[in-house]
Image: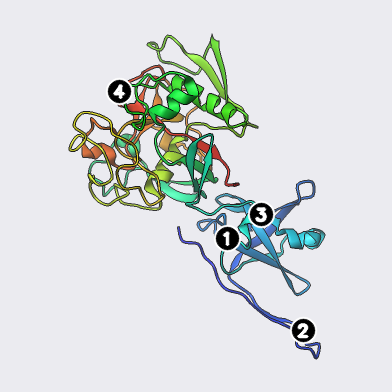
Amino acid sequence: MKKILAAFVILAAAASGLSAAVTHGKTAGTVAQKNEVKKEIVIRCADKDVPILLGSRLYIMVDSTPVSLDVTFPMMASATCRLTPKYASYFKQINGGMTVYYGSGPVENPEKTGMTRSGEMKTAAGIELVSLLGGTFMMGGRDEDENAQINEKPVHRITLSPFWMSRTEITQGVFETVMGKNPSSFAGNKNRPADSVSWYDAVEFCNALSIKAGLKPVYIISKSRKDPQNTNPSDTLKWTITVSANADGFRLPTEAEWEFACRAGTESPYFNGQKADKDYSWFEKNADDATHDVAKKKANPAGLFDMTGNVWEWCQDWHDESYYRVSAELNPAGPASGSEKILRGGSWINSGENMRSSVRNWSSPAEASNNMGFRVVLSGCRK
């Protein structure tokens, strides 16, 4: 979705004392409410189908002064903002119903606000991460895609908050460093993706990596209590795993985050076009029945490698074939229960049809196969 940015021009007052003249930019919305404690302002979007995106320049006119705001949390019909630090003193003068305008250019001095830009990189606990600033996209298999399955439909609008995603699938070398073991069937090369990793293994890895990075683990794991939400009769483990709301550590991507990252703004069946391409993916046509070193193929438009092919990637969600019909629009977390966990992206053993951005796969959380691996994410967009 394109950002809608319109320039505003301020003509400085002349020495003679004439008032400053302002040509306003396009209306972004109006002030809906203020949070006095957090010093936050909620903006109601002027057009609910064009949400205010993170990184948009916004301003409010207060006594002929354009007071700028930084977007901190974009949603479908509203956005939470804070006044740019140098205008913090104007907070009390902001009132409900005031018009909010789009300004020109990106956020000023992102280093000072702590924000990052889409596509920037950072390293945490030895993991290279790429920033994805969230936003709105259409999720699912399009009608014009003749290979789209019923569980990929209907296409539905999703809006996501910002997150960081690991640039590659977690490698055998990283997995062994963090966990002290390497379960991979294609062992012997630490730059290949870790394979034969169950969903439980991936979740434990996320917690261990969080601790290594000095972050609060996301998952609360109880191995002694059977999960009542797990309806899989073949899963003898059924660990009860819940998500800590206040954690800042590593986790698996939600299915929506994964597809958003894979598509990277594209609408075609494959992020690279209309068909699977050996320049981007390791799959049955070029993988020679094995995994390969990560980042040897071209990256997708978001700068992420092996988003399709090499190994299937675990997501956080339970699978439900009909979930897309009832999915929340904002940051969907998947069904509350199920018997299998979602896998995305295809693998070395699969055909080109499985490289499509909308393809969904699933398996028991206890299953560990030589074509299954994962990558990790961190919530937020702070540096």
Q: Is residue 192 left or right of residue 215?
A: left
The amino acid sitting under disc 2 is Ser
Q: Secondary structure at mark 1?
A: loop
The amino acid at mark 1 is Ser
Q: Return the disc, 3 or 1, that comes first in the chain's sequence.
A: 1
Of 137 and 375, the residue lying toward us: 375
The tag on residue 56 is 1
User: As drawn, is 84 to the left or to the right of 268?
Assistant: right
Compare marks 4 and 1 and give the one earlier in the sequence: 1
Check disc 2 and report the residue beneath it: 19
**Residue beneath label 4, please?**
370
The label number, if any, that marks residue 113 in the structure image:
3
Q: Nearer the viewer, mark 2 or mark 4?
A: 4
User: Badge 2: few (under 14), some or many (20 or more) residues near its Cα, within 10 Å?
Assistant: few
Disc 4 to disc 3: CB gap under 8 Å: no
Decide: few, some or many residues near mark 4? Use Cα within 10 Å; few <14, some 14-19, many ≥20. Answer: many
